[in-house]
Image: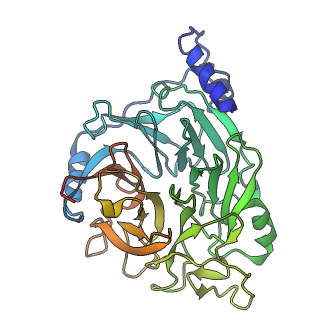
Amino acid sequence: MRWLLFAASTVALAGTALAQPTPAPKAGNLDKLSEFRQTGTVEPPLVPQTGRRVDALKKNLERVKLPSGFTIELYAVVPDARHMAVGPSTGVVFAGTRKSKVYAVTDRDKDRVADEVKEFAPSVDLKIPNGVCFSRDGMLYVAEQNRLLVFPAAEFFYEGPDVAAFLVIKQGDLIPPTEESYNHTARVCRVGPDGKLYITLGQPFNVPPKEKADLYAKTGIGGIIRIDQDGKNREVFATGIRNSVGMDFNTKDGTLWFTDNQVDGMGDDRPPGELNRAAEAGQNFGFPWYGGGSVRTTEYQADPVPEGVVPPQVEMDPHAADLGMTFYNGTMFPERYRGGIFSAQHGSWNRTKPIGARIMFTSLKPDGTVDKTEVFAEGWLTENGEYLGRPVDVTTLPDGSLLVSDDTAGAIYRVSYEGRD
């Protein structure tokens, strides 16, 4: 695989003295980094991890309710923290944002509290780098609004402002530029058990106009695409998805699960959010004929529903904004949680009585389908409807503890278990 060659070259060049270049505009820095040349970018300051903000975040966490034996603590202050990827070798956490930065979060002494938070690859001009994911061989992929980058050996060469970086899908080729929008544009990615890269492509409308159907079906907008890790052999893996901002693979059976945010403007209590299971390629999950669950959209209510539409495994509370999810494959938590799904509800924005801002847990049956869903952690939403935080994503550290990102508070929390099974 060519990224392995890039990583090897990076190691070889690490000790080579290179001439200091003249600082270059960010637009041209990617070319320099792909040629292992310096850009002259100044190291950005570290994100402070002490002070009044930290004290306030810790105090807010006192309100969070968890099952007996579990504890939640502040792991790091990370501005605008969204989706996370944990380095498979070092445990360094990379956090994407909906703005222009990715952060590297390091716990150097392994006391399970981050010691250092800083901008990752500051010499690269990024646009909505929400989606971050690792391959099993340590390649960090960053899915932007309309581009895909790879950073070989990122967890080993992130210390300085310059790090090896390469284009996988160039700007304007992830989706047609005509479909770029400020809405539903946060991508997520995962490397599957087949070694291919999966990327969600939310469509930009509440309900898309019918004249967009052919374009979206062809490009995978309103669905999930998969590609080889070098960007080749693109195909549409799943369709009928409004805006998925969370997915993960069940390692036991290889199925891909994903959350989906459903149609707005249909009232407080309809339609439901979704947690879906894709058992094979080519499945259709019902949007835009269904606005969520079995609720038909007004725009498509007279249109026949395609045959074979796959219903959701779980109908979540309407408008709770289900985002990131992960299968729990750690061993710290009690047996009942192992192999189940943790997922984050960001919290409603258009409900007369807000709901969400919590972590859900979904257990599975022996056949790999859903057993039941329950609230695991809540308390970020006050009784008077104020958000003290809004969870976005969940992932695990190597020790089996659970990380929770919060883009409103600008933080990452750590949930650990010290009780008895």
Residue 309 placed where, x, y %? 67, 79
Residue drawn at (57%, 64%) of the image: 244
Does 183 appear above or below 97? below
Residue drawn at (30%, 69%) of the image: 381
Residue 50 placed where, x, y %? 24, 39
Residue drawn at (29%, 67%) of the image: 378
Which residue occupies the foreground of this view, 241 or 397? Answer: 397
Question: Is 193 displayed left or right of 116 in the figure?
Answer: right
Residue 387 placed where, x, y %? 33, 66
Quarter the C terminus occupies: bottom left
- Answer with the quarter of the image where residue 288 lies: bottom right
Which residue occupies the foreground of this view, 351 or 83? Answer: 83
Residue 75 placed where, x, y %? 30, 45
Quarter the N terminus occupies: top right
Furthest residue in direction bottom, as rendered:
302
Furthest residue in direction front, as rendered:
366
Q: Is residue 143 visible?
A: yes
The colouring scheme, among rainbow, by chain, secondary structure or one colour, is rainbow
Does 14 appear above or below 102? above
Residue drawn at (39%, 30%) of the image: 45
Q: Is residue 221 visible?
A: no
Which residue occupies the foreground of this view, 387 or 66? Answer: 66
Question: Is 399 displayed left or right of 305 in the figure?
Answer: left
- The number of numbered badges drawn on the structure is 0
